Image (tube, grey):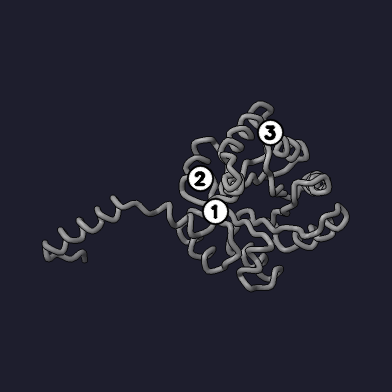
Amino acid sequence: MKFFADTADLADIRELMDTGLLDGVTTNPSLVKKSGGDFIETVTEIARICPGPVSAEVIALDHAEMMREAEVLRRIADNITIKVPLTIDGLKTCKALTSDGTMVNVTLCFSANQALLAAKAGASFISPFVGRHDDVGYPGMELIADIRMIYDNYDFGTEILVASVRSPIHVHESAKLGADVMTAPPSVIRQLFSHPLTDKGIAAFLKDWEATGQKIG
């Protein structure tokens, strides 16, 4: 499963890239606002730091204006993925862009039927929001299981990009269900490294090593 970071924080992206685990980045207007930087400059720098897909979202709601904004965004770098909402105009834009060789991430997916439509429109990625589903009492991971089954039934090439990831449990369940990608805040990705038994083992090894009085090198 590919790991994307859901952030526009350049320092976090650089740190995660150094681990060798980061395959891409997703952004949205809220994340860019949180970073405090200029939108185009921030996305340009992210695309330079991370060679994998970098999702940049259009703001327009009508097809013609989405296409205009997409043209600006895809000129930034070859690894820019245009992010569009799951609406009729969004899917029209998806079809036009993917037919022209541009990667498209269809976002704000909340049903398997929506995911089916996005795949038929040629989406490179579909972003179902599991955390927001959990918030309203619907098990978000059930949506991932349904989309996986439907996509496998018809051999769709659209990658399932699990979004609105809130915890390591979401990552674990996504991998078990065969999701292609998960995108999570850097804080959640860092939690994946942590386990109390790992910490306990390191502490014990260091204590025993100190008792030997030895050094390496």
> As shown in the figure, which amino acid type bears the numbered disc 2?
His
Residue at the location (69% across, 44% down)? 109
Residue 28 horizontal side relative to residue 201, left or right: right
Q: Residue at x 51, y 45 (%)?
A: 170
Q: Which mark is residue 170?
A: 2
Does residue 119 sit above or below 154 in this rendering? below
Q: Going by the picture, which residue comes out furthest to the left?
A: 212
Residue shown at the point (11%, 62%) measured from the top left: 212
Residue bearing the label numbered 1: 184
Dot 3 alpha-carbon crowd within 10 angstroms: few under 14, some 14 to 19, many 20 or more: some
Q: Is residue 123 left or right of residue 65?
A: left
Image quarter of residue 206: bottom left
> CA gap, disc 2 to disc 3?
23 Å
Q: Earlier in the sequence, mark 1 or mark 2?
A: 2
Residue for badge 3: 156
| Circle 2 crowding by C-alpha within 10 Å: few under 14, some 14–19, many from 20 | many
